[in-house]
Image: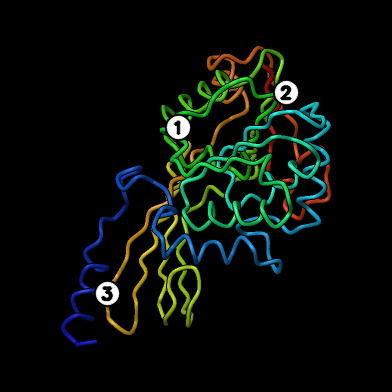
Amino acid sequence: MSPATFSQTLWKIYNRPAKPTPWATGGNLPWDDPDFSERMLREHLDESHGAASRVAAERAAQIEWLWQKLRLSAGARLFDVTCGPGLYAVAFARRGCAVTGVDFSPAAIDYARDLARAEGVSARCAFLRQDVRAMHDIGGGFDGAILLYGQLAVMTRAEAQSVLAQIAGALKPGARLAVELLNPDRVDKTDSTWWFTDDGGLWGNAPFLHLGERFWLAEENLSVERYQIVHLETGAMDEIQLCDQVYPPEEMAAMMRDAGFSTVEVIPAWGDLPLYDADEWLVYLAER
């Protein structure tokens, strides 16, 4: 790394806007980047934490709960929106469901297909690599749907409304959708900064410096995180912006009804399931 390159990177950081513009760069992690998706897959499969996917015991509790709440049975068709590496989808397929999963991470979709083959349920699983904001050729007649771990919140309100409407259109009358979103009463509404270094991880496979900033935009009920990743061997820098739209329960329930759902039940803390972060979440159970 030349001193000039490193100096240019530092000046970029110094001259950054005081606050990022929400959604200016899409507002999401680069899930569809092949290298990033491989690194994120490692985090999904790491059983030492639940930051990307919950650990196996917690997933098992959720799957049983969803099986009951969605009124699923062997032979039912399930739509898994933002399915990731298929950890939920394949578990439902083992119970006899036919599952269609959609995600736009190439590494996650490849892993989901391999997992379904390894578990002997590939005939009951279809994994599609698509951005859920532009889904197509999904079909219809599903008996249930899931959209977990807050992924609806990394879309604009208009995108979220469109996705909810498309899910509603893919469900049978009387079928249910479960959406997991952060409880607005538990969201950190303070600004903060942090930094750390590592030899490798989510942000790269070589030493890097991570500089993070979090902004709470009260007028928009939105948090924006800006990450500046300095790759120490080259001096190059990546900037990533993550938006997280927070929804009061009454607003999300209204959006679901506008999308075509007849009833919406709001369930705090996953109905007291033994999840390490259960109190941070609300589950919206919407019936078509």
Residue at mark 3: 236
- In the picture of the structure, the residue carrying the numbered disc 2 is 265
Of badges 2 and 1, nearer the viewer stands: 1
Q: Is residue 274 left or right of residue 27?
A: right
Q: Nearer the viewer, residue 200 or 109?
A: 109
- Name the image quarter holding the N terminus: bottom left
Circle 1 residues within 10 Å: few <14, some 14–19, many ≥20:
some
Looking at the picture, how far across and down is residue 230, in whole percent?
Answer: 34, 74
| Residue at left offset 66%, top offset 56% | 115
Could you say where residue 88 lies in the image, as x and y percent from the top left?
Answer: 69, 46
**Is 82 drawn above or below residue 134 in the view shown?**
below
Reading the image, the residue beneath label 1 is 135
- Secondary structure state at the residue bearing disc 1: loop
Q: Residue furthest left?
A: 4
Work out which quarter of the rendered image holds the C terminus and state it: top right
| 227 lies left or right of 165 | left
Residue placed most toward the observer, 60 or 183: 60
Please state which of the two labelled residues, at mark 1 or mark 3, is closer to the viewer: 1
Marks 2 and 3, how far apart at CA: 48 Å
Task: Name the side, left or right, on which 205 lies relative to 49.
Answer: left
x then y, percent, for residue 46: 65, 67
Q: Residues within 10 Å of mark 2 (few under 14, many from 20)?
A: few
Residue type of the residue flagged with mark 2: Glu
Q: CA distance from mark 2 to mark 1?
A: 26 Å
